[in-house]
Amino acid sequence: MGQVTAKLRKTTHGFAWWCPGCEEAHPLPFERGWTFDGNLEAPTFTPSFKHEWQSYGPNNEHRCCHYIVTAGQVAYCDDCTHALAGKTIPMPDLPPHLRDDYDHKM
């Protein structure tokens, strides 16, 4: 699939955006109970999204990213395990490696 705005990529089941707290892309499906308002520039997805996984490595810790996207603002819930917990930020632009115009030969 491809980039649809500076902030979103189209996926099979919705969109993906870049989470600066986790430093990775997160899916934003609009199926299975989630809704999307159709605004690609300042999207709203409801209800909240919660991604949980086990981090493997020296600390082998539980990771969590829980947030609400409203009018292009990402409100991170307090149960996030990264530094943006409890903060609200504008949805960031996709990093270069997730943009369609990225030159993979660099």
Image (spheres, grey):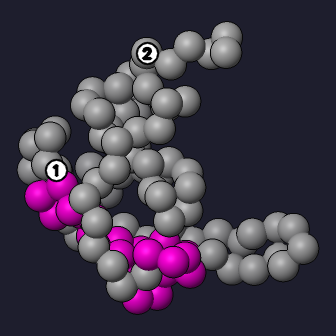
Question: What residue do we see at 10% from left, 43% from top?
Answer: 39
Is-magenta flag for residue 74?
yes
Mark 2 Cα shell of 10 Å, populated few (<14), some (14-19), many (≥20): few
Q: Is residue 67 above or below residue 80?
A: above
Instruction: Judge from the rendering whether residue 20 lies leftward or rightward of residue 59; answer left or right.
Output: left
Mark drawn on residue 101? 2
Question: What residue do we see at 36% from left, 85% from top?
Answer: 86
Q: Quadrant of residue 22?
A: bottom right
Question: What residue do we see at 16% from left, 63% from top?
Answer: 70
Question: What residue do we see at 82% from left, 67% from top?
Answer: 56
Q: Is residue 20 above or below residue 86?
A: above
- At label 2, which amino acid type do we have? Asp
Q: Tell me whether circle 1 and circle 2 mark residues in contact (CB < 8 Å).
A: no
Mark drawn on residue 73? none
Residue 10 appearing in the image:
no
| Front in this rendered view, residue 3 or 46 | 3
Instruction: Judge from the rendering whether residue 20 lies leftward or rightward of residue 76; answer left or right.
Output: right
Q: Nearer the viewer, mark 1 or mark 2?
A: 2
Q: Report how far apart the C-alphas of labels 1 and 2 lie in the structure.
A: 22 Å
Instruction: Judge from the rendering whether residue 20 lies leftward or rightward of residue 15; answer left or right.
Output: right
Q: Earlier in the sequence, mark 1 or mark 2?
A: 1
Residue 2 appearing in the image:
yes
Mark drawn on residue 43? 1
Percent x, y of residue 41:
14, 40
Q: Quadrant of residue 100?
A: top left
- At label 1, which amino acid type do we have? Pro
- The boundaries of the magenta stretch are 64-84
